[in-house]
Image (tube, rainbow, N blue to C red):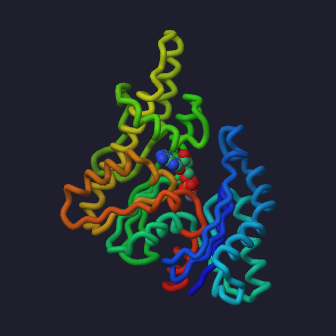
Amino acid sequence: MRILAIESSCDETSVAIVEDGKKVLSNVVFTQIDIHTKFGGVVPEIASRHHIEKITYVIDEAMEKANLTFDDIDKIAVTAKPGLVGSLMVGINAAKTLGLCYNKEVIMVDHIHGHIYANYLESDFNFPVLALVVSGGHTELVLMKDHMDFEIIGETLDDAVGESYDKVARVVKVGYPGGPIIDKMASMGNPTYPLPHVKLGKDSYDFSFSGLKSAVINLCNKLDMKNEELNANDLASSFQDAVVDVLREKTMRAANEFGAKQIIVAGGVAANKGLRKALEEAVSKEKDLILTFPSFKYCTDNAAMIGVAGYFQDKYK
Ligand code: KG4
Ligand code: ZN
């Protein structure tokens, strides 16, 4: 089963061809990061305009790299939700047009399922699987007892993790997207600033990151008023320490409570070095628990993950 997959939910125009949900024959990603950097975040209207400009080229390039024609493609998968409406529309229209022209079924895929299934490229799933989904728009703990069976057991009540990384980077004025920059700065600093590790009670699997963000803003304002210098690397380290501590604690507790055999980490923040290290350490103390992350290129938005999720959606419908 060869699937041509399209992803355009935010600021990446991506097309991939994936065989049997496992083998990536091509995965072309055109990122608009440089275009949005000067605005300090994604501007939806600009994002959709660039998707329109790029989509046909990215489709052609993915077909060329895989050295295939449309006769070799069985189905088309596309990100249907969630995302920026104008951006999603471009991918969906491209998918439906290809479907009509070449007489192929179009599979409408949930972007979050895509992030989760990016892990399948690296490892088979050992159910029950606990997925920690941490992206720019989502923070969720999802329990999977089987393929395409998703039970949300906890989620953020306010900001998503990636969003709070981007906001802190904006406050410290270090650039966009904030996640990779703050992650690097954290590795060069120490967690010297006291910031809240918000856990919402010992039984809760929900998250809240808005208080942490406010604490960072208040701290910067206070230091500014007192004319004291901020050690940005130490602040990044303190922030990352608070985020990672909360994510690790809830993930490990949920894995134990629900008898997970495997923890998978999904979404852009799965690239975070501090999170990887903390979870690796925690899982190494457990018996018979596997931990997987997607490789770095499949952590942030890409169409290969949509091709994998599309394959399983089709198989289990
Ligand atoms: O999954 P993704 O590409 O897009 C969404 O679906 O939201 O995630 C993008 C988010 C951004 O907020 C970015 O700052 C964050 O992932 N991110 C990171 C790292 N790399 C990307 N956050 C923390 N540490 C990283 N190394
Ligand atoms: Zn995403």
Q: Position of residue 155 (x, y in %)?
A: 44, 54
Quarter holding residue 172: top right
Residue 137 in sight: no
Splitting the image into four quadrants, where does ligand 2 fall?
Answer: bottom right
Does residue 238 appear to the left or right of 314 in the view shown?
Answer: left
Q: Position of residue 250 (x, y in %)?
A: 32, 51
Q: Position of residue 37 (x, y in %)?
A: 68, 41
Tell me what residue is drawn at x 53 percent, y 59 percent: 297
Q: Quadrant of the N terminus?
A: bottom right
Tell me what residue is drawn at x 51 percent, y 44 percent: 180
Residue 43 versus residue 69: which sits nearer the camera?
A: 69
Does residue 135 appear to the left or right of 106 in the view shown?
Answer: left
Quarter holding residue 285: bottom left
Residue 45 in sight: yes
Check the image and report above or below for 87 versus 22.
above
Q: Position of residue 109 (x, y in %)?
A: 59, 72
